[in-house]
Amino acid sequence: MKKDEENFLDIIPVKLHLDCKKQDGNIHLVFTHITLLQIFLRWMTKKSNVSTLELDGLGSLVWENIDGKNTIYEIINILLKIEEDRYESMQQRVFMFIRILKNRKIIAFKESN
């Protein structure tokens, strides 16, 4: 395992976006578009000012385990107890999903103590 991967495993993800609901067993993140530009563009395209992002099964499990206490390493191990998979494969899937959430500013990172 590379040093940066080891450091990434010690990071604790924290939710920045709290508006979500559980529907049909999956988490749906709810986004309200409130800037003038967003409102105008959505009005022009006749779309609602509210949109949702439905997470798949794995994404929903990751989201439910982001509690501000669990490290990424702990989240991976929780998922491995639920879903049968190899550690390396699960790690890669979780890393990719966590990075997407971070890049979209849906979560933030804090270092474990």
Image: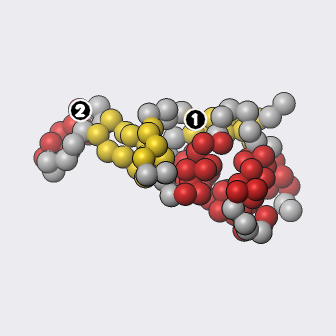
Instruction: Report which residue position mark 2 lands on.
Output: 36
Circle 2 — which element?
helix
Q: Quadrant of the N terminus?
A: bottom right
Residue 6 rendering spot, x and y as whole percentages: 83, 52
Left or right relative to 78: residue 26: left
Q: Nearer the viewer, residue 29 or 103?
A: 29
Left or right relative to 11: residue 105: left
Instruction: Report which residue position mark 1 lands on.
Output: 15
Q: Residues within 10 Å of mark 1 (few under 14, many from 20)?
A: some
Q: Is residue 4 visible?
A: no
| Amino acid at the residue labelled 1 | Lys
Q: Nearer the viewer, residue 26 or 54?
A: 26
Q: Residues within 10 Å of mark 2 (few under 14, many from 20)?
A: few
**Which residue appears at 54% of the width and 33% of the height?**
16
Left or right relative to 51: residue 113: right
Quote the CA–CA distance across marks 1 and 2. 25 Å
* Residue 48 figure quarter: top left
Residue 94 rendering spot, x and y as whole percentages: 66, 57
| Amino acid at the residue labelled 2 | Leu
**Which residue appears at 45% of the width and 38% of the height?**
20
Sequence-first disc among 1 and 2: 1
